[in-house]
Image (cartoon, rainbow, N blue to C red):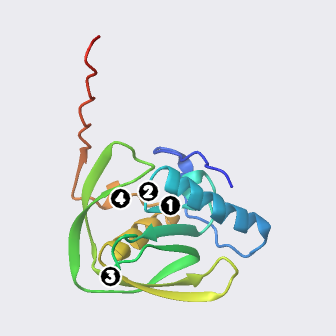
Amino acid sequence: MAVLEIVTNPAPVLRTKARKVTDFGQELQDLIDNMVETMRAAPGVGLAAPQIDMPWQVIVVEFGDEQDEEIPQKLYSVVNPELVRFSQETEIGVEGCLSIPGFVGDVERPVSVTIKGQNRRGKPIRIKAQGWLARIFQHEIDHLEGILFIDKAEKVWPVEEEPAQVMPAD
């Protein structure tokens, strides 16, 4: 496995609609493994194939808390994902993106969604998600349509850098 370079805005692949995956062979398996490693190294909670300059409909999402039994950490890899249902109820949340480093913004999204797609082996899957997990899936699926969070944000602002620790002089 390898940590891949994450492309940043304005890379053209980020504004291009990703292609549907039809071959579930070794190239796709390697891509998904590399995407997971890249997402974790970033660190992030989701990654779409266009973010590593691969215009395929593939996303990986990892969400949860290893110490919280109510929200156990779970890794999802979804090929050809589609939002098939979403709640009328929406919520504004702060989002950031590995492809837009240094900025965050307020984005309004449905609170719950249902996603259908395929697993890494091509078998159909259906995922119901709510709260932050639903937000992550929507953000990553937007990438496959060439949409960035800044396109939907009500307000975008730079992330405030944490002040550097000053080492005492000897």
Name, please, the residue furthest toward the right: 26
Query: Which of labels 2 and 3 is toward the front?
Result: 3
- In the rendered image, the quadrant that contains the N terminus is bottom right
Query: CB atoms at circles 1 and 2 under 8 Å apart?
Result: yes
Q: CA distance from mark 2 to mark 4?
A: 15 Å
Mark 1 vs 4, N-terminal side: 1
- Residue visible at 66% across and 51% down? 2
What amino acid is found at the position of numbered circle 2 in the picture?
Gly
Mark 2 vs 4, N-terminal side: 2
Is label 4 in a helix, a strand or a loop? helix
Q: Position of residue 49 (x, y in %)?
A: 58, 60
Disc 1 target residue: 47
What amino acid is found at the position of numbered circle 4 in the picture?
Phe
Disc 3 target residue: 70
Mark 3 vs 4, N-terminal side: 3
Q: Is residue 52 left or right of residue 165?
A: right
Residue 14 visible at all? no
Q: Which of the numbered marks, if any, corresponds to residue 44?
A: 2
